[in-house]
Amino acid sequence: MIEGACFCGTVRFRIAVPPTKLYQCHCSECRRVTGAAANASCLVPVNDFRWLSGEQDITQYLAPSGYRSHFCARCGSSVPNRMKHFDLYWVPAGNLPGDLDMQVAVHLCVASKAVWDEVVTTGQRFDAVPNIDTLLKLLR
Ligand SMILES: [Zn+2]
Ligand SMILES: [Zn+2]
């Protein structure tokens, strides 16, 4: 059982089974949302996820492309959101404690990464986004 939180601590949640694998997406939208080279994320089964506080303080932005960003209205941190078509929560890895035994298993959208982004050598790389079954298999 682990707990995650946004920068200001308003949004807090609990995950029953800590994820062991995560992915990083290097696409231009993830760069803008995070302000960083890539978005580091895990996928957590809905049944393992529970909000502890701050759910009403979550705001979302829906881009014309369909990209959805959920963030804490007080501090702007990315926060988890429930995936539309799957029984999974998307969870920003940076919301979780840094001492978890997790490993980057997948790099997405490597073909559109920033020139200065040196993708580390661990994990499988995809030029774009593979289908969800492929991704889930690699994150298991
Ligand atoms: Zn916050
Ligand atoms: Zn992305």
Image (spheres, rainbow, N blue to C red):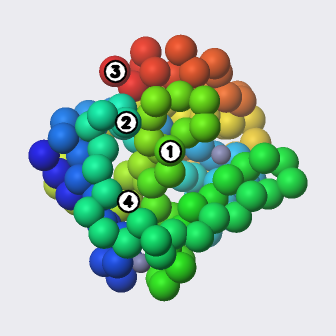
- Identify the residue shown where x is 86% and y is 54%: 64
User: Residue 9's image quarter?
Assistant: bottom left
Secondary element at image label 2: helix
- In this view of the protein, can residue 53 be seen by the observer? yes
Give the labeled residue for mark 1: 82
Discs 4/1, front: 1
The residue under label 4 is which amino acid type? Gly
Q: Earlier in the sequence, mark 4 or mark 1?
A: 1
Q: How many marks?
A: 4
Q: Earlier in the sequence, mark 4 or mark 3?
A: 4
User: Residue 52's image quarter?
Assistant: bottom left
> CA separation, marks 4 and 2?
19 Å
Which label is found at residue 46?
2
Discs 3/1, front: 1
Q: Earlier in the sequence, mark 1 or mark 2?
A: 2
Query: Quadrant location of the C terminus?
Result: top left
- In this view of the protein, can residue 115 be seen by the observer? no
Secondary element at image label 4: helix
> CA separation, marks 3 and 1?
18 Å
Give the labeled residue for mark 4: 94
User: Residue placed farthest to the right in the image?
Assistant: 64
Secondary element at image label 1: strand
- Identify the residue shown where x is 38% and y is 52%: 93
Secondary element at image label 3: loop
The residue under label 1 is which amino acid type? Arg
Give the labeled residue for mark 3: 140
The residue under label 2 is which amino acid type? Val
Relative to the observer, which residue lies in front, 29 or 61? 61
**Side of 63 relative to 89 (left or right):** right
Discs 2/3, front: 2
> CA separation, marks 1 and 2?
8 Å
